[in-house]
Image (tube, rainbow, N blue to C red):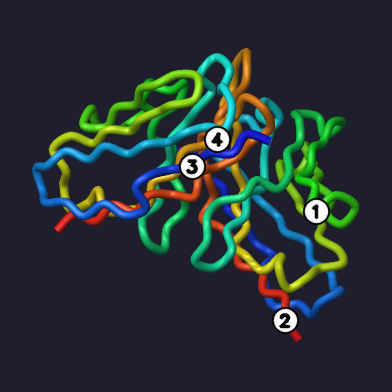
């Protein structure tokens, strides 16, 4: 099983700042089958990024994904208060596993 | 508009059974494969099960093998998760998820709002 470790656990930033979220895999994620999801409080997760740098439909270009093999990054430039959420990475190369999540607080 | 609406959650005693349903709309049901993903209170996301387009192939996480059964009724455009021998650790919100379409491995494109299953005496 591919284990995903996300860091940091929590990120507290101000509006307009940049957030950099890390996702490290226990083994190489083939063909970069990695996705990122956003989950706001009390809501279902929403797909943000897949493949690992393609934005899903309707996702603003403030969100960008990068990385390959075992190291992946989600960057949120120009944070807005509505970006406050937990962000999960997921690999879908070998079964499906998620990281434990990074909580982003924007205030 | 793509929508996935789960139902069937509730309170059940340990050892009991429950059947979850998911009624998708806004797309052709038979084209897509589906998953169930769960989230225990205050915890992260965990994949549970997957079914292919005609229901002939299924996949399960080890911790539900032999207890849960995923199925689909393409005539009724409905996805199911039959959960037997429920344990306290199965308490979670269960999400119905539509897989993306295309070649290669596919990601989780759309999620339902979830249905809460509570296993407790």
Q: Subunit of mark 3? A: A
- Residue behind mark 3: A5
Q: Is residue B62 left or right of residue A90?
A: right
- Residue behind mark 4: B108
Q: How far apart are marks 2 and 1 (CA)?
A: 18 Å
Report x, y in % for residue A9: 37, 53
Q: Is mark 3 on a helix, strand or loop?
A: strand
Report x, y in % for residue A28: 56, 22
Q: Is residue B97 above or below residue B14?
A: above
Q: Distance between the residues labelled 1 and 4?
A: 20 Å
Kindly identify the residue that appears in the image at 65 percent across and 45 percent down.
Answer: B47
Q: Is mark 4 on a helix, strand or loop?
A: strand
Kindly identify the residue that appears in the image at 83 percent across and 54 percent down.
Answer: B68
**How many labels sit on residues?**
4
Q: Subunit of mark 2? A: B
Kindly identify the residue that appears in the image at 12 percent across and 42 percent down.
Answer: A17
Are the numbered discs 3 and 2 placed on the same chain, yes or no? no
Work out which quarter of the rendered image holds the C terminus of chain B and state it: bottom right
Along the line of sight, the residue nearer the viewer: A37 or B113:
A37
């Amino acid at each position: 099983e591919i284990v995903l470790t996300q860091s940091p656990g929590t990120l507290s930033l101000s509006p307009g700042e940049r957030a950099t979220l890390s996702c490290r895999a226990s083994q190489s994620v083939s063909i970069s089958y990695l996705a990122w999801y956003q989950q706001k409080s009390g809501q279902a997760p929403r797909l943000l990024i897949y493949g690992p740098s393609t934005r899903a439909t309707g996702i603003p270009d403030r969100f960008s994904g990068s990385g390959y093999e075992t190291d992946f990054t989600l960057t949120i430039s120009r944070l807005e208060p509505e970006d406050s959420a937990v962000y999960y990475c997921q690999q879908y190369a070998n079964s499906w596993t998620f990281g434990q999540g990074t909580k982003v607080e924007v205030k | 508009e793509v929508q996935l609406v789960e139902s069937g959650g509730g309170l059940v005693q340990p050892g009991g059974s429950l059947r979850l349903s998911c009624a998708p709309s806004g797309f052709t049901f038979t084209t897509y494969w589906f998953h169930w993903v769960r989230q225990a209170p205050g915890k992260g996301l965990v994949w549970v099960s997957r079914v292919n387009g005609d229901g002939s192939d299924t996949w399960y996480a080890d911790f539900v093998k032999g207890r849960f059964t995923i199925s689909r009724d393409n005539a009724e455009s409905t996805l199911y998760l039959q959960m037997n021998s429920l344990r306290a650790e199965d308490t979670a919100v269960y999400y119905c998820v539509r897989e993306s379409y295309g070649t290669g491995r596919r990601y989780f494109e759309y999620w339902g709002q979830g249905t809460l299953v509570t296993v407790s005496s």
